[in-house]
Image: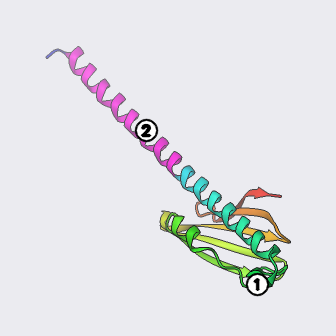
Amino acid sequence: MGTKQLLLIVLGIIVIGVAVTVSLEVFDTQFSGQIRDMAIQQMNDIGTNAKTYRTKPKDIGGGGGSYKGFKIPESLKEDALSWKFDLKATDDRLNFYMISKQFVYNQKPYFLLGVNEKGELTSIKLFDPEKNDWKTIFEN
């Protein structure tokens, strides 16, 4: 084999290696973006249910103007992408947390915090484990 053929083979291997590396990076970024988007949709659904609960009178199973007693419907829990849920409720405010069980970054789970105040979803924050800080995704 001549030098030109060997050079072309080595160059081809390098190009293929770079292409595979770049495509894996793009896939990883897109995948975590999809997970985040699905979790945000889940949080919006929980917020809508919380608002409905708060506005319903106590006589028919609602909160009667309070978030106290709100529970996340089982149907929303079943649709979750391996998330654990935690709620902290007062009369005027509901903090609901989604904590990832499977999807992690450097052995740290993703956290989402949704805040409902007086019947409205006011903010959604994502804990960025890479920067060790909360990032606001939505604020009303």
Task: Tell me, yes or no, if residue 14 can be seen here.
Answer: yes
Front residue of this view, candidates 99 and 2: 99
Query: How far apart in space, not on screen, are marks 1 and 2 (Cα)?
Result: 47 Å
Q: Is residue 137 left or right of residue 102?
A: right
What's the residue at 50%, 64% (across, down)? 104
Q: Quadrant of the C terminus?
A: bottom right
Prevalent SS, magenta region: helix
**Relative to residue 91, is residue 108 depicted above or below?**
above
Q: How is the image coloured?
A: rainbow
Total of numbered circles in the picture?
2
Residue occupied by mark 1: 68
> What's drawn in magenta, residue-wise?
3-31
Which of marks 2 and 1 precedes in the sequence? 2
Residue occupied by mark 2: 23
**Relative to residue 60, is residue 109 depicted above or below?**
above
Residue 16 placement (x, y as % from top left): 34, 31
Residue neighbourhood size for the residue with mark 1, other residues' Cα within 10 Å, grouped as few (<14), some (14–19), many (≥20): many
